[in-house]
Every structure is written in structure tokens, then in C-alpha cells.
Amino acid sequence: MDTKEFWHLINAARFAMTDEVPFHEALATLLAACPKRQILEYQDHFDTLHNALYRWDVWAAAYLVGGGCSDDSFMDFRAGLIAQGRHWYERAATSPDALADHPDVVAAAADFEDRTLFYEDANYCASEAYERITGDTEIFWEDWKQYAADHPSSDSPTEPLGEDFDFDDEDEIRRRLPRLAGLFLSEGT
């Protein structure tokens, strides 16, 4: 599976989702129709894209959008950005402040809702697909461990990339993410 095929699967799942079938279930269904090797390749691409967003500026955007953001929540936010498709993923990767244009983010800011774009289940589509094929999630993790050993890639960063800064410093947030700050921070604070 190459990058184009990865994004094709994401877009196909977005197209297949309904009110009754959320994105992660649609994606798991599509992946379950693939050979196991292709599911592992999907996971490899997912992890690479997920790790590329492990940055302080992206975390700050998640902090604003989510009204706070723990380590686990940041994993879910990055998965949610991947689930938005290539266009939004690349926009956020280029400039997290561009998320101020995302319709769900704009709506969340207007309605004082948090957690938009946070999507925990999107982290586990490959293991869900494996479970549908084999009846056992553990088989995925065993196969994944072997696949990762046979296909070493760059290690996951242990610390976010970029410059760390205080997400509670509103002046700093406004300087770094002015458009998102305009949506989520009160004027004059």
C-alpha cells in the first residue's frame, strides 16, 4: 500500500459512513476486505502520519479545540485529523492554525463544544479489521510486532517536535495560533 492508496481508503470510508455507520466502522469494514498484509501496511502509514503530527504546535491547537488536551487525548486528536482526509491532514500539518477554517471547529467554537476532531476509535481500525477476519485482536498485535521488526521505520518520537511553550499563556497562544485563539479564547483575556 502506498500513500495514495492509504488516502483512498480514508476517503472511501468517509464516503461510506452514515448516521448508523461511523467512519471507524466503515474503515474497518473496508480494511477487513483486504489481505492481512495490506492491513499491516495501512497501520504503518497511519503510524507514520500520526507520528508526524506529534508536535507542540499541533498539540496547542488540540488544547484550544478540546478545552485542554492530555497525552491520550492528543493521540485521539491526531487520529481525528487523519480521519478528516488528506486535505485537512495536510492543512493542519502545514499550519495547525488553519483548523480555524474547519467547519466542525468553527461550529464547536460557536456552540462552546469541545472534543471536536478527537476520534479515539480511529486509532484502532486496523486491529478491528483483523478481529473481523480472525476473530481475535491479539493476532493483529502479534503480526504487527513481526511486521514492524521486518520493516523498521523511523522510531516514534519520545517528545513532541518543535518548541515547547505554555498552552495556558494566552498571549503566546494568540501569537502562535491567532485564528484558533480568536475562535476559542475570550476577548480581552
Image: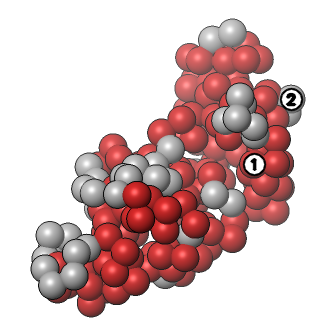
Q: What number is the disc on residue 14?
A: 1
Secondary structure, mark 1, is helix
Q: Taking 189 as reference, is 83 left or right? A: right
Q: Which residue is mark 2?
A: 33
Residue 22, horizontal then vertical, whole percent: 67, 35
Residue 54, horizontal then vertical, whole percent: 41, 63
Placement of 32 over or under 160, stated as above or below: above
Circle 2: residue type? Ala
Placement of 171 over or under 151, stated as above or below: below
What residue do we see at 34% from left, 57% from top?
112
Residue 36, horizontal then vertical, whole percent: 78, 29
- Give the farthest residue toward the top: 135
Of the two numbered discs 2 and 1 on the same chain, state the one appearing first in sequence. 1
Q: Nearer the viewer, residue 148 or 160?
A: 160
- Give the farthest residue toward the bottom: 175
Q: Nearer the viewer, residue 14 or 104?
A: 104
Q: Is residue 66 visible?
A: yes
Circle 1: residue type? Arg
How far apart marks 2 and 1 lie (CA) works out to 16 Å
Q: Taking 1 as reference, is 24 left or right? A: left
